[in-house]
Amino acid sequence: MTPRSTSRRNFLLSSLAAGGGIVALDALGPFAKLVHAAEPGAQTGLADDRYYIFCYFSGAWDVLLSLDPRDPTLFTAENAMDTRIVPGYEMLQPAPESPLIDTPFGPVGFALGDLATKHADKIAIVRGMSMDTLSHSTGRRRFLTGKPPSGLQARGSSAATWLASMMGKEQVIPNLSIRVESFNADQPAYATGLKVSTVNDMLRALTAKDPQLPPFVEHQLDFILRQASLCNSAEKSDFQTIAEASRVKALELVSGGLSDQFNFLANTQEMADLRQHYNVIPKNTNGLGTNKARAALATQAIMKGISRAVSVQVAGGCDTHYSNWQTNQATNQMGGFSLVARMIEDLAANEYKGTGTSWLDHTNILCFSEFSRTPMINAQGGRDHWLGNSCLLAGADIKGGQALGASSNVGMQPQAVNLATGQVDLNAGDVVKPEHVLRALFHAGGVEGDPADLRAKPLTALLKNG
């Protein structure tokens, strides 16, 4: 794959003769939220070569199977009343040959699969986090925004929105959200996430609709609409300002052949390689609605210079209160972590803009779920919601090959840690929450202070240059 950089200005210069009228009267739909509103405040020192992928595991994962396991020879049914932890590996169907994978930084759960066996040196795990909630929507929104929601309502903008606002103005789609919620409470509208669920959704957003007018007519219509937007009455009207900006934004999206970058069914070597790498086997367009295709869409959007921040669901089906925990939880996690491994390999294999470095050297990946599941098995043979959590990171600014923090060996309670070292410090440490992790990403990107008002210090132990 050959990375290609794209800017708003270049697309506008090349698009006057294509698609100008397609949204002239229908632009106040999904594109209205993507237009330029207020300009971001000046911020010096921001990294201009950083990209972000947020990988969501939907349903609340069981970290005993992956990020925060326990040795089943030490945590047994006989001492479960003392430890309040039941690994339950033997209950899984099929039961793993070995529930633990040894890494240089200690054992991890088998559900990490080849993300651990092939890329242990690239990943960092944060254990012993606290989510302060047992509600799916509240936990998910806290991880997305770094702020406790007000009731069930998100309070503040998503981290991806902040990053797109500060670093992504030149991208055509600064903030892309693939089957993940996105929030914009206080940032420029161009940073609002464009929401899609499938590759087909993306193709529809980037393709001019029929019937299309002849190019000359399109050019004239575009000229007339642009001139009309400059008159005094139009400039004083918020409605007309939004309408014109929406039209221009839609024109950017459908001009310049962007849809070709996501035509995964195309009979080209590039798309054949992509399908093989992510194991996308679409007999028809239905195959483009899988998590595998979503993962490929995320990395394409980054490496083609289209998006600065992408949020993507890579796994679902983790809400396993019943015996489905025994059959589905590990399988669904393994599928998601396998896709993260493929994304790491894809980014690492592609050169970043002729610099001799890879896209992985410039992209940070964060894997998260809304919370974890209870360390004890319930009466239905599954696990319920648990306040604790873990997360996994890799990429540009992340110091790989380490596990930070810890949950206790009695009931898996979150433990306070020193944010600079990641080591447990029950006396002077902080219990890690999503905002500490997000602040670390902001800090590494050169963001000064705490503009998102997360009210937490960064977990600098995560960073290569903490």
Image (cartoon, grey):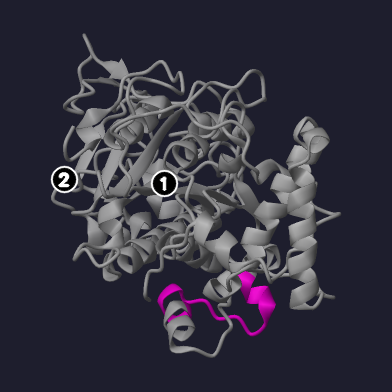
Q: Where in the figure is residue 122, as x and y percent of width and height?
A: 23, 53
In the picture, the quarter occupied by the N terminus is bottom left
Q: What is the span of residues highlighted in magenta in the rendered image?
A: 275-288
- Tell whether 74 sits left or right of 202: left
Specify the quadrant of the image occupied by residue 338.
bottom left
**In this picture, residue 197 sits left or right of residue 26:** left
Q: Is residue 446 above or below residue 262?
A: above
Residue on which disc 2 sits: 105
Query: Residue 75 at what x, y percent from top left?
Result: 30, 37
What is the crowding at mark 1: few (fewer than 14 residues within 10 Å), some, or many (at least 20)? many
Amino acid identity at mark 2: Phe
Q: Nearer the viewer, residue 150 or 373?
A: 150
Q: Position of residue 14 (x, y in %)?
A: 57, 68
Depicted 288 relative to depicted 404: above or below: below
Alpha carbons under labels 1 and 2: distance apart: 19 Å
For mark 2, does the 10 Å Cα neighbourhood hold few (<14), some (14 to 19), or many (20 or more) residues?
A: some
The residue drawn where x is 30% and y is 41% is 47
Q: Is residue 19 visible?
A: yes
SS category of the residue bearing label 2: loop
Q: Of all residues shown, which one is farthest toward the top?
A: 427
- 279 drawn magenta: yes
Q: Quadrant of the C terminus?
A: top left
Residue that numbered label 1 is attached to? 367
Task: Give the x, y percent position of residue 396.
Answer: 26, 49
Provide the secondary structure element on which disc 1 rests: strand
Tell which tag, 1 or 2, sits nearer the viewer: 1
Residue 236 is left or right of residue 315, and the answer is: right
